[in-house]
Image (spheres, rainbow, N blue to C red):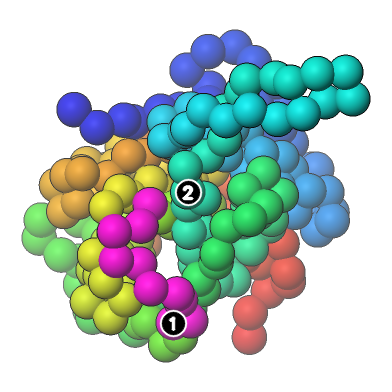
């Protein structure tokens, strides 16, 4: 079975960073908010690094030789714009020789009238995901890390991976990194992408009618960079 890992499944400093991100009185400072996302990126990158492939090698120190290990290949880092950028920065500092790709994905128009029409399946508004920008290296037989701070329904991540696989080649291994995920979103990703490994800061139970995570933290993109108009 593939990995579903949460930083908060054990008591650690991750709880402190997650609390700073969620607290409405602290998250209003954009620089601090981005910096805390970056720190979660550090922690998730470290955890993912434990599952990557390594090879032995020998290096010379000032006084002798040391047998150690190095990554067989650096993973390709792919944030979903724009909200994924601060989290990506943490990954890029850990995996400093990684190639990177960038995907612009956002929620398109709601398919149903927002006032009175809900989908019958889950009492939620339905919406499309629009992908308007992809800049990415060849992904054939690569290990990739998709980076998106909020895994709500999972639609953005699923569509992004499917489109990347079509356009850029089939990766050999998929890791998904998010700061907060809903239980429903995790299930949706597992159903659609059964080989994906999920690395999450914290897991919340619910989505609201517009498919935002509750209690979540709000709109990570707006909190990082300002409100969209």
Name the one closer to the observer, 149 or 95: 95
* Residue tagged 2: 73
What secondary structure predominates along the stretch shown in magenta? Answer: loop
> Dot 2: within a 10 Å radius of its alpha carbon, few (fewer than 14), some, or many (20 or more) residues?
some
Instruction: Please provide percent x and percent y for residue 133.
Output: 46, 85
The label shown at residue 134 is 1
Q: Classify mark 2: helix, strand or loop.
A: loop
Asked whether the viewer can see residue 2, the reply is: yes
> Dot 1: within a 10 Å radius of its alpha carbon, few (fewer than 14), some, or many (20 or more) residues?
some
Residue 133 in the figure: left or right of residue 20: left
Asked whether the viewer can see residue 211, the reply is: no
Q: Which residues are magenta?
A: 134-143
| Magenta region includes residue 135 | yes
Residue displayed at 73% across by 69% down: 225
Q: Quadrant of the N terminus?
A: top left
Q: Classify mark 1: helix, strand or loop.
A: strand
Residue displayed at 48% across by 81% down: 135
């Amino acid at each position: 079975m593939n990995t579903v890992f949460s930083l908060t499944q054990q008591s650690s400093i991750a709880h402190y960073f997650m609390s700073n991100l969620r607290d409405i009185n602290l998250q209003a400072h954009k620089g601090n908010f981005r910096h805390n996302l970056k720190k979660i990126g550090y922690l998730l990158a470290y955890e993912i690094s434990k599952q990557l492939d390594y090879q032995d090698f020998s290096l010379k120190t000032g006084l002798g030789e040391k047998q150690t290990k190095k990554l067989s290949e650096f993973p390709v880092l792919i944030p979903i714009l724009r909200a994924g950028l601060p989290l990506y920065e943490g990954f890029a500092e850990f995996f400093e020789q990684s190639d990177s790709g960038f995907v612009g994905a956002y929620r398109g128009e709601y398919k149903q009238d927002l006032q009175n029409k809900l989908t019958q399946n889950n009492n939620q508004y339905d919406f499309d995901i629009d992908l308007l920008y992809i800049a990415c290296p060849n992904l054939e037989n690569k290990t990739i890390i998709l980076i998106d701070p909020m895994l709500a329904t999972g639609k953005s991540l699923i569509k992004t991976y499917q489109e990347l696989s079509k356009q850029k080649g089939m990766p050999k291994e998929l890791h998904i990194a998010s700061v907060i995920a809903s239980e429903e979103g995790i299930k949706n990703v597992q159903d659609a992408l059964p080989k994906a490994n999920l690395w999450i800061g914290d897991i919340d139970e619910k989505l609201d009618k517009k498919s935002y995570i509750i209690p979540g933290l709000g709109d990570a993109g707006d909190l990082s960079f300002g409100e969209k108009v």
